[in-house]
Image: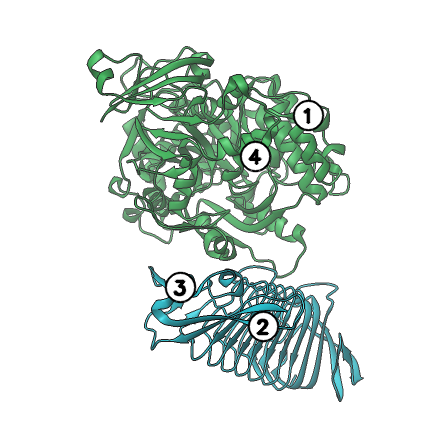
Chain colours: A green, B cyan
Amino acid sequence: MSTMVIKNGHVFDPLNGIDGEVMDVFIKDGKVTADLSGSDLARAEVIDARGKTVMPGGVDSHAHVAGPKVNAGRLMRPEDHIGSVRPKTEVAHSGSGYTVPSVYKQGYDYSAMGYTTVFEAAMPPLEARHTHEEMRSTPMLDMGAYLVLGNNWFLMRYLHQGEIEKAAAYVAWMMKTHKAYGIKCVNPAGVENWGWGKNVHSLDEPNIHFEVTAREVIHGLAEVNERLGMPISLHLHANNLGHPGNAEITKDSLAVPADVGPSQKMGVDWAETKKDPHRAQSVYLAHAQFNAFGGTTWRDFESGAAKLAGYVNKSDHVVIDNGAVPFGPATCMTGDGPSIHDLYVLAGIGGQKWSNTDVELECGSGVIPFNYLKGSPISAVQWAIGLEMLLLVDDPWKTIMTTDHPNGGVFTQYPQVIAWLLSKRARDETAAECHKWGYDRSSLGGIEREMTLSEIAILTRANAARTIGMAYRKGHLGAGADGDVAVYEIDPENFNPDDSDKVIRAFSRADLTIKDGMVVARQGEVVAVPEARRYYVEPKVDEGLAKDMLADVREWFKYYTIGFANYPVPEKRLRNPVPIVVNGPEGGW
Amino acid sequence: MVLKRKVKLTPKGEIGIMVEAESISPDSFAGKSEAELGEIAVMQGPREAKLAEFFEVEAWDEETTVEGDVAVEILIDGDVSRVKRIGQRMTKGRIEIGGSAGMHLGSEMAGGEIRVRGNAGSWAGMNMRGGLLEVGGDVGDHAGSAYRGSWRGMSGGKIIVHGNGRSQLGGGMAGGEILVEGRVENFCGIRQNGGLILVGKDAVRGVGAEMIGGTIAVLGTIQNFTPGFVAAGTERDPAIGDLKIEGEFSKFLGDYAVSKNPKGVLYVKEAVI
């Protein structure tokens, strides 16, 4: 691999306390380095970033980009593909799809925006093989996937019985077995009830058969997560998603693991950062927008963001991603099967296509196309909530910008979300085009805050990487970090954040996207297809405990439709797998 | 006196792999010389080719007394049933085809007119917004329908079929008119929510399934009537938009299978229920 110098750019590297200073970034053998020797400098590829913005490569900690529900969305929506086609080029495949692009197009589109790392936020264990197959075919991006465990039979049984150690052993085994990266908890205890046409609507109602409560599942999984020292904290999709008034239960859900301290025990070498690169949270709330609804019905529906953000502000164990709604077509897809059914009923048009599935002993899923219209009162409030959740939380290190792609919107709309965060005028202009509920039923209109480019860098790379345990190599430009860099056509010395068209143009098509020290996209055009890694964790647990746990697993395995031997995903299914040992015997991290 | 551009395309011979030629339209032909027209790109499978590879191209100007409309007129002298997307997205002018046309003829067209002496393949007039598409023979499946998976199909314009239609004619139709002199097969007007479909003869089954608006009139028999429709009496010589149809018709409203208050109206001469 070659050497590279990105010269004279305005560097935004929040994990290293660098806020727009003009400096050079050096990369050697794919890694950022403090300096280059004279001979290295002489043969280095020099990139002139004068008058431009330089950030670490973008990190998306929450998107739905691989696996059977994503593919169900593709199959269900031919109309999503007809108007969104990219032709093949010398280096890149053809592809199609707007809200649910094909794997190739998805990789190229992210790369065009300067992103280099994307994590799939909900991999059902039984569907891990499919998920990995799709990730294997996704170009340009380093990836990993969170395993859906909030309604898992084995875990519900252990957690209800208080067998936390066996629960931890099971999670450890599942991570290795399915080559998964983190724990995702979707509508805890509720999705299991959905198998019986029911749901749960509070933290303390026991579900059918397992008699476990959402509270027990959330607390138990958070405890397991920290016992194992996982890179990412529990990623929580709280109960009652999409229901008016759910901000209350969301706040209460976040309080459940408040007594669990973060503990990241990763056997990795940490690149240099000024700021502590370890995550500070023990719960990471997914798509806060969908869980920050106020009111009691759709008639008195309003934003509940102020309430939820107030809780986040005074709680240091919480990080959120917002799940913004930038308007337009979306495809809602989630492991929360009942919420998709609710949306289907709410949409009120008979014959609307949708899908739902039950994943045996593990979880569920649903998919439905949805169009967020500016003229719709509900959509307008959701737009406001998505932005409030980022603007009302004072500490940017507690927030991450997403659209919960493709639920609230499409990842290619991130630049539009950035434009709203940077400029109150941009928000006012959109509010004027929206149904009046947008401003009337939220606090967004009264928020003066306008984010800085440094804060955008926190929300789109630095904190995303730190929150998921990737800051040992991603989300910053300290020595030893991956040579992933985005150069944007924005001159911070001559920058008008109110010029939304320019902001959107700049962030939509990065001037340069560099991955592992190689230019992979120029002005949004893919010029090279790099090798990409697939991360997963290998937690270490006591062998005797693991043996006892496996006996339990075998006892119930008869309820699966597949054989035990066919359950695991072999490592050879992954391209460039990077296992991360956690909770290993050797200390020192 | 104004000059009208006329272009004649004569097929050179049999076409193997189908050609995709959305560039055959008055809009893209406008202002081009004969030589430039021959250079226009079309696709044959994954290969880019030139129009002149498949057609003799002749272009000339004619004096016309017609005021205003000087859009290009295209005459295709022969069979182009292996050429797809002729007239796609056209907004003006005229295309006349002596033989039959391939799939997607006039799909998404917004204006102008297309007349085909022979048949048209599937998806003719898909998502049409305006203009006139007239077919002397039969049309394939999905004439005047929405693209697969989408909610809204044809929203304006007129399709006239002198022969028969096939399945899913006018699917998702939101506006405009489709007149079929002959019969249709399955699911005519499925998911229709506006506009008018007139079928001169019989329909097989599924007429108006999931429709919530618009009007369908079947002047013959529906073999298998769609469940979800409610009888609303009979009408003699009902007026349907600007059209008047003659005789005694049973009237139905639906489709109650998908809506509590559907606005779809279905007239039929004779239904086998």
Chain letter behind tag 2:
B
The residue shown at (61%, 34%) is A289
Closer to us: B196 or A223:
B196
Q: Nearer the viewer, mark 4 or mark 2?
A: 2
Q: Tag 3, which secondary structure?
A: helix
Name the mark on residue B35.
Answer: 3
Q: Position of residue B7 (x, y in %)?
A: 48, 71
Q: Residue at x 45, y 22 (%)?
A: A52
Q: Which label is found at residue A423?
A: none
Chain for disc number 3: B
Residue A506 in view here = yes
Q: Quadrant of residue A47?
A: top left
Circles 2 and 1 in contact, beta carbons < 8 Å? no
Figure quadrant of the C terminus of chain A = top left
User: Distance of mark 3 from mark 1, alpha carbons?
Assistant: 67 Å
To the question of a shared chain for discs 2 and 1, the answer is: no
Q: Three-letter amino acid code at disc 2?
A: Glu
**Same chain assignment for discs 3 and 1:** no
Asked if the residue under mark 4 is in contact with the one under mark 3, i.e. CB atoms within 8 Å, the reply is no
Q: Is residue A72 left or right of residue B17?
A: right
Q: Report which residue position mark 4 lands on.
A: A416
Could you tell me the amino acid type at mark 1? Ala
User: Percent position (x, y) of residue A312?
Assistant: 60, 21
Read off the residue under disc 2: B63
Rendering quarter of residue A425? top right
Question: What residue did someone put label 1 on?
Answer: A306
Residue B59 versus residue A55 in the image, above or below: below
